Amino acid sequence: MPDTPTSASAVDAAAQAATLRHGAFEDAQALFAGTLFVAMALMLFNQAGLLVGGTAGAAFLLHYVTGISFGKLFFVVNLPFYWFAFTRMGREFTLKTFVCVALLSLLTELFPHVMHVDYLNPLFASLLGGLLLGTGCLFLARHRSSLGGATVVSLYLQVRYGMRAGKVQMMIDGTVVLLALCVVPVERVAYSVLAVLVMSGFLWISHRPGRYTGG
């Protein structure tokens, strides 16, 4: 029996999806690049005394209070979120997220030994850092990964309920940054809120359900 137009189009769609699917090398380079962008943003924030939201924000707060390095704290703070990621987003997403969190922890420990900024305006740090964060997280999301914590929750809500990941991320990150008023000067918190708005706005605009088909 000859193929009907419907079955032929279905075959074509399946073939196109297989062609667009990311390979292992594509995943590896995107996860590394995305994590590197985020590490650079966190280096700028640390240098300028700023914060970020989610588990990274919690790790920053603990870093400022205890003096323990951000990389170690970030890795530990994310541990409880792996079970949620595994049960809601699947094994592949969880494994990639674990690798990216470990890589980010390593890069933030390494950066002070290979890069130092003598002067950094906090306004510039908030704008550039927010864009780097948004770009890095977008790379990771499009290759089915994240940096744990709030990002896992926001991506799950987008996949499950169609809620914009950037909008959810903005609400969570804004709450975490505002809680920092107890630890960080108001001026630095204001710059940190700006960075959150830049990052979340970038994701809100750029990461829409169904727009990107390379998953």
Image: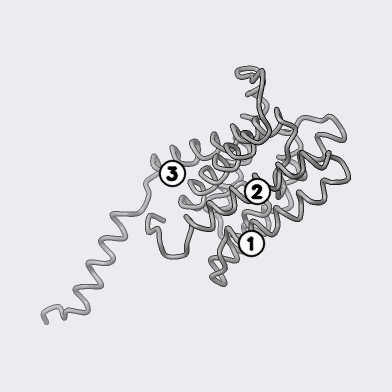
| Disc 3 to disc 2: CB gap under 8 Å | no
Q: Which residue is mark 1?
A: 168
The answer to which image quadrant residue 75 occupies is: top right
Q: Identify whether 183 is placed above or below 151.
A: above
Instruction: Point out the image quarter for the N terminus.
Output: bottom left
Q: CA distance from mark 1 to mark 3?
A: 25 Å
Q: CA distance from mark 2 to mark 1?
A: 12 Å
Amino acid at pointer 1:
Val
Q: Specify how the rendered protein is coloured.
A: one colour
Residue position marked by numbered label 2 in the rendering: 196
Q: Secondary structure beneath disc 1?
A: helix
Residue shown at the point (77%, 30%) measured from the top left: 69
Looking at the rendering, in which quadrant would you find the C terminus?
bottom left
Mark 3 or mark 2: which comes first in sequence? Answer: 3
Quadrant hosting residue 59: top right
Q: Measuring from the top left, give residue 162's x and y in whole percent.
A: 53, 70
Cα separation between marks 3 and 2: 26 Å
Q: Which residue is mark 3?
A: 27
